């Protein structure tokens, strides 16, 4: 039975939104026009929109806004689900050790690795940061490495979405800067910054820092001369299950690779082979859309970052290559509860569940006049052309009940956009060019300093605050960036206040 009220257009829209958020039968019966009305960008900035304070729908964390704000479970989760969540949290925090060990359930680290636990990169389930200096720990940031495809077979595999990159023959797909005893680390990442001066239209100066990267102290010989580098900081873990539950057709509906509408925005979808589903799928995760599912993303990180074999990546050497024979010959952590794998299917399933259910924190100050003014400016600057405010999650049985049929506010279109030469890493990944990046979700961005104690943003943490992050935008976002740069200071502050409320 429909529960949509017809008293007035305003009440009708409100009731539709409530139906969608509650995942009721009425939500499943919505027409395309009714659904589009809910998801359309607002034109009224006099007050917060209905449910705007709940960016994760009923799964939103409304209870903790301290350092644990990103580590809370979906708030509408069942009691049984909460048990699985906290077991998964234990595995996410597990410190893996060198094999062989008496701790047979947690041995098999490395031999080459970037961190001993998922939580070491995703500290408090939040955002990584660049090292403060060349002697500082780079544990929440690493350097991707690859070489250009050189054969027709490699180029065809990329075109067919079967592989993302061609690994560097000796060092694989990323630099592992730590090793277990008796083995040499692959090297270390060195970052050097130069200042770039910029001026707002009102004359206020701002200094951006431009990084350059190099691979120092290579432990296994020289790299190929044509090697490509790309630095990456760990992304926040919140809301991943909700992003995974957005219908593929909704994402594709926003794509405009040829800029047919002439607005200068050319969102491009990316596809890649899913080991979990054994088919090519729409990619959703990673700075350049490297993986299609939480299973693929988590399993890839377990193998590449920690060196732990798992059902999707059963090799015990992690990212070790044939040119690193001592790495491949190192003892593996097998024979314990994981059998022939260091992380069993049961362990990985709990990690997937945990990753899928990390809740997005509720918005703060949504009705504050300064925040509402900033929201209006954000829309006027066309930031929403890429940072799409609202989506709805699917309402079918393949979606976890806690994530099903939710009205969510992630501020992303999950598409690739050309961000210009300033942010280009020059390293293609699959069909993503060296200057294309996924639109980063903005939900929770205002809690970064509270959770992680810093305000470093963008894929490599070069931006020291939100203002710098905006000013690094180029390419398709140049018009929006220039709109921000030419605002007067009160308007700039209002837009930043809006972002901090997310």
Image (cartoon, helix red, strand yellow):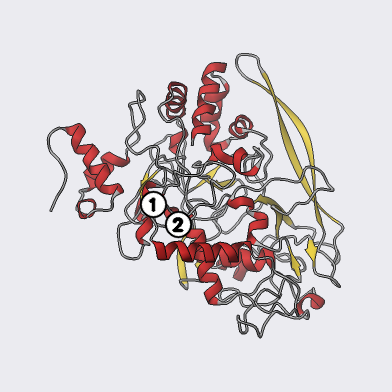
Decide: is 369 above or below 429: above
Q: Is residue 161 visible?
A: no
> Which of the two marks, 1 or 2, is nearer to us in this view?
2
Please name whichever residue, 362 or 399, is drawn nearer the observer in this view of the structure. Answer: 362
Q: Classify 10 Å Cα crowding around label 1: few (below 14), some (14-19), many (20 and above).
A: some
Q: Mark 1 or mark 2, which has the lower sequence index?
A: 2
Q: Residue furthest top?
A: 202
Please name whichever residue, 78 or 462, is drawn nearer the observer in this view of the structure. Answer: 78
Q: Classify 10 Å Cα crowding around label 2: few (below 14), some (14-19), many (20 and above).
A: many
Percent x, y of residue 162: 54, 68
What number is the disc on residue 241?
A: 2
Q: Is residue 251 left or right of residue 291?
A: left
* Residue at x 69%, y 45% (from the top left corner): 129
Q: Quadrant of residue 330?
A: bottom right
Percent x, y of residue 68: 57, 48
Q: Is residue 21 left or right of residue 471?
A: left
């Amino acid at each position: 039975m429909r529960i949509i009220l017809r008293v007035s257009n305003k009440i009708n829209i409100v009731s539709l939104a409530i139906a969608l958020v509650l995942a009721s039968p009425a939500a499943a019966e919505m027409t395309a026009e009714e659904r589009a009305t809910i998801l359309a960008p607002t034109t009224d900035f006099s007050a917060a929109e209905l449910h705007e304070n709940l960016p994760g729908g009923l799964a939103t964390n409304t209870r903790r806004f301290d350092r644990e704000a990103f580590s809370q479970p979906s708030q509408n989760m069942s009691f049984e689900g909460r048990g699985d969540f906290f077991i998964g949290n234990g595995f996410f925090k597990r410190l893996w050790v060198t094999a062989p060990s008496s701790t047979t359930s947690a041995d098999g680290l490395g031999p080459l690795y970037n961190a001993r636990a998922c939580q070491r990169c995703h500290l408090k389930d939040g955002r990584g940061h660049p090292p403060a200096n060349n002697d500082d720990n780079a544990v929440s940031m690493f350097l991707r490495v690859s070489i250009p495809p050189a054969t027709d077979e490699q180029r065809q595999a990329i075109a067919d979405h079967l592989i993302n990159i061609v690994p560097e023959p000796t060092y694989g797909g990323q630099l592992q800067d730590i090793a277990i005893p008796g083995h040499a680390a692959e090297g270390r990442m060195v970052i050097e910054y130069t200042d770039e001066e910029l001026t707002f239209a009102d004359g206020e100066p701002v200094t951006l820092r431009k990084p350059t990267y190099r691979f120092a102290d290579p432990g296994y010989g020289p790299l190929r001369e044509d090697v490509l580098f790309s630095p990456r900081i760990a992304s926040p873990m919140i809301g991943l299950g909700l992003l995974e539950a957005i219908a593929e057709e909704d994402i594709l509906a926003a794509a405009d690779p040829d800029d047919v509408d002439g607005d200068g925005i050319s969102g491009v979808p990316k596809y890649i082979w899913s080991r979990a589903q054994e088919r090519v799928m729409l990619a959703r995760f990673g700075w350049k859309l490297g993986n299609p599912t939480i299973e693929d993303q988590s399993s890839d990180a377990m193998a590449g970052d920690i060196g732990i074999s798992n059902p999707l990546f059963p090799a015990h050497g992690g990212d070790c290559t044939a040119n690193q024979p001592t790495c491949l010959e190192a003892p593996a952590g097998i024979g314990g509860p994981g059998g022939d794998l260091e992380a069993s299917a049961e362990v990985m399933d709990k990690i997937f569940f945990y990753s899928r259910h990390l809740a997005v924190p509720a918005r703060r100050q949504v009705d504050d006049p300064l925040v509402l003014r900033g929201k209006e400016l954000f829309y006027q600057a066309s930031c929403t052309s890429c940072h799409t405010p609202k989506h709805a999650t699917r309402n079918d049985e393949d979606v976890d009940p806690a994530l099903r049929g939710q009205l969510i506010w992630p501020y992303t279109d999950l598409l690739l956009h050309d961000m210009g030469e300033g942010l280009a890493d020059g390293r293609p990944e699959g069909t993503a060019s060296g200057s294309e990046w996924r639109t980063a979700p903005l939900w929770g961005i205002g809690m970064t300093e509270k959770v992680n104690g810093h305000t470093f943003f963008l894929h490599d943490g070069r931006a020291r605050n939100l203002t710098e992050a905006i000013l690094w935008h180029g390419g398709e976002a140049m018009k929006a960036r220039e709109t921000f740069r030419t605002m007067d200071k009160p308007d700039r502050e209002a837009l930043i206040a809006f972002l901090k409320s997310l």
